[in-house]
Amino acid sequence: MNLLSRSEEIVLAAIWKLANDAYGVTIRDRVSADTGMPWSFGGVYKPLKQLDHRGFVEKIPGRPSPERGGRSKFYYRLTPDGREALRDIRRIHQAVWSEDLEKSFR
Amino acid sequence: MKSFPGKAGLPRTGKFLLWLFLDGIDFEEAVGDFEERHRAILAAEGSFRAAFDFWTMILRSLPGFIAAQISWRFQMIRNYLKIAYRNMRKQKAFTMITIGGLTAGIVCCLLIFMYVARETSYDRHHSDYDRIFRVAEEVKSGSTTTSFAAAGFPLAPALKAEYPDVEEAARAFPIGARLFEFGEKKFYENRVSLIDQGLLQILSFPFIEGDPRSALSRPNTAVLTRETARKYFGADPAVGKTIKFNGRILLEITGVLRDTPATTHLKADWLISLETVRATFGEFENWHSTMAYTYIKLKPRTSAERFERGLIGLADRHVGGELKSLGQSYRYFLQPVADIHLKSKLLFEIEPAGNAGALALLTAAAVLILIIAGLNFIGLSTARSTRRAKEIGLRKVVGAERKQLFSQLLGESALLTSLSTAAAVLGTILLFPVFNRLAGTSFAVSDLLKSGNLLFLAGIWLATGFGAGIYPALVLTSFKPAATLKGSFQTGRFGTGTRKVLIVGQFFLAALLITGTIVIIGQVRFMKNQDLGFSKDQKLILPVRGNQGLATRSEEIKAAFLKLPAVLGAAVSSSVPGRGTASFNVRVFDQAADRNWSMDHLFIDPEFLPLYDIRVAAGRPFRRDMSTDMTRNFDQAPAFLINEAAVQAFGFGSPDKAIGQRIQTGYGGRTGVIIGVVRDFHYFGLQQEIGGLVMEWLPQDFNSLTVRIQTAGLSDTVAVVQREWKTLFPGIPYAGFFLDEDFNKQYQADERLWGIARAFTILGIAISCLGLFGLAAYVAEQRTREIGIRKVLGASTSGLAFRFTGDFVRLVLLANILAAPAAWFIMNQWLRGYAYHTRVTPGVFVLSAVLSLGLALLTVGYQSIRAAGTDPAVSLRNE
């Protein structure tokens, strides 16, 4: 099984949460908010590229917008495979973080 | 506030950074994201915060960008490598030529770099070498000024006592071959120096055993190298042993040196404390001898120039009165110890100086060869690139950016240069034995791995990879895809101009190399064939040293050798040609009494001149039946022979007028009459001009026996002579040598240079021809259709081949014409370093041009004949 890396997981989850408004700026903001750390664009693009390459997200060019200096937004959307991968990782998390382990951290 | 698009946009450098790392839509996306954020912050918090945020974001993003590049590029690089490999396989010959040429160039450069680095590293291993100097002496006597590498013995103690800036001053007195005995083991050692203890503090001798601070502070102590110690004592410890030196002096071994590096001018296997000979050697108070090599270490931060100025008047303070009566003055000057090997051209230099001019020539050759190889690489790559125009065009059509193509092509160049560099390292290692023999070095793989060499290699690799790769990449990526795909590009005018310039450039450099080599060969041959004024053939020299008494027993010894059937003649003398002589001042009577000339002195017996075929110009040679010719003791008035140069120097006008003149020699202050004048002969090598020579029949100074032998059965003769030597001088090792071999050693440096230059010239020319071959093949292919049409229209095969060849030959000829003045200038500069030299004649240039034209013809001719011979039906159907 080819698991998601931690950064891929975080980015993928962010895209899922952002639904129809997932593009570079929003993903970065969301990920930064989720993790409590200021992510750089470079830090976001790398997992995005891998997710794209592995077929977990698709990249959709949007309309050119003036606030981007006339450049297009590139939206990201989860593919069914992406959703599957997210579900897998969640299942593994639950298995790994068994009840006893959870308790010892409380 | 309304903002202008330009003002709100991202900083240019930032954008450029993004562009560098991102391609295509990734770049679009990133610029968009960055800009959106930038605008938002600009509106909310102002331009300063926006810029700050932007730059921190960029910097923090770089690792991510690079990581994304790598993981993504990995796929692309695999693809590129595959393409590169396929291209290389498709054009095997072309690839071999490209790689081969560059490899040869790098090998040359690397070898030359290592050689130059070695030659310039002499005496830099001494700690604080920049504070260590040798004090040399300039003697002004009458009109002549002579500089000696050595000075009088009292100089070093005086320097130490009188100059507070001197940290240490010490003397070295190399004494040449001496006999050392330990029990049954007897050896003549050639590299023996008597030195002051202080020298161990000045120069860094690598002690393994013993204390450099005190090893030679007592008389009768010695230090020797490990290698030498093994010869006498085997595995036993050397320190504490006693060894007999020069037949009578006992020396205690107080230290062992690791073998001294080969890169020092003062090579020694034995260092003996100078104090040992204080009692017996009468020179310690003599300011006027030039035997003691005097080294000083100045205190830190002492100005050498100021110190040197302070040396003025030193000799006058001590022996001013004597100098006045001799009509001489001494000036002392400093030589930085690291400069001695390459720059010192003084009389009595310890070992022949390195050839700085040769090094410059070699370096120039290396640079030329590397440029030739680089041009070759560029030429071949651009030629090849047109074949790939279709590939590039298609890549562009399917969306490749120029940037990507550029890095792909540059990468391919880098791949080729990497292969070349790797091959060059292997080639260099394989060539080490050959080069070592050629250059007299001892390079091994471990030398190659020194950091300096690796750095140099990396530098060459980068320089050629980028320097030679960038042009083809630029040209190729500039193609318009439409043109290349339509095919019109194939016969386009691209590259003809560039190609011409490249060919001319390559052959210009090759012509420089060829001309240089011809001149060097000519000079070496000139020196070897020069009429030396004496015959150096069939002469076996037997040095008889120490108290073995050639002075008293010379006739008996000569007679013993003459009894041997293979010995045709024998003579004794104080020195032999090529080994130099001592010089003393000579005064002529009947002239202004304060005029002195420094003259070389040679002491010979009557058999010497006929044995060496030295002709007499006037008067008569020494004769056995004239009892006054031989100087039996110093009270007797001597008879002198002088050479023509001395006649000139003294101003006698003609040899005949010199006969009967009275002169006084500085050697013992004796006055005598000139009885004859001999023709000039080169008693030094040809690098030095013949000076004035005074000869005297003075048996007390004889130390060399010359035996003329038959050429037939040479090895038997040598064996017989050796046997005779053993009976005459029992226990003394035989140290005979052949005069011609010894004399020719002087030209070794030049012959080496010649050998190296020849090897590298051949390489340089080979590389040029490789390039020409490749280009000709390419052009021939390009012009198949043209040639086909011409043939259909009635052109003859020979006419076409001629026309085709002519294009190249014209360029080569032009290159030769351009190169001639440059070569003329450079080689004249080089020849100026020799007192006797050939001239650079026009014939040299003609020969060089003929050679390179011939080679070019051979290279191109094959291609032209093949191209012209093709059946037009085949070549036209081809398209």
Image (cartoon, coloured by chain):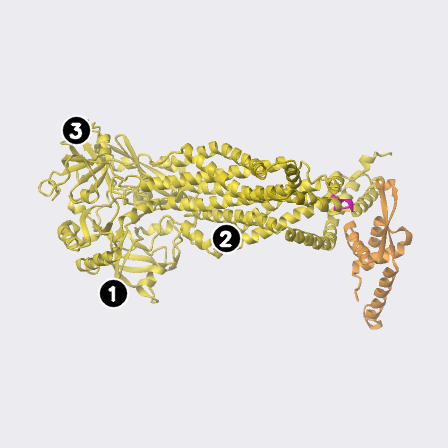
Chain colours: A orange, B yellow
- Asked which secondary structure carries label 3, the reply is helix
Dot 1: what SS?
loop
**Label at residue B428:** 2
Q: Tell me if B512 is positioned left or right of B242 in this view.
A: right
Question: Which of B92/B728 is in front?
Answer: B92
Q: Mark 3 points at which residue?
A: B657
| Neighbours of disc 3 within 10 Å: few (<14), some (14-19), many (20+) | some
Residue density around tag 2, few if under 14, some if 14–19, many if 20 or more, within 10 Å: many
Tell which residue pokes out farthest to the right in this image: A20
Residue B374 visible in the picture: no
Output the chain of dot 2.
B
Magenta stretch encompasses residue B50: no
Amino acid of disc 2 = Thr
Residue bearing the label numbered 1 = B184
The CA span between labels 2 and 1 is 45 Å
Q: In this view, does B751 lie to the left or right of B381?
A: left
Numbered range of the magenta stretch:
B395-401
Label 1 – label 3 distance at C-alpha: 58 Å
- Residue B403 point in image, percent of width and height: 72, 44
Residue at mark 3 to residue at mark 2: CA–CA distance: 63 Å
Labels 1 and 3: the sequence-earlier one: 1
Position of B601 relative to A60 (above/below): above
> Number of labelled discs?
3
Residue B396 is covered by the magenta coloring:
yes
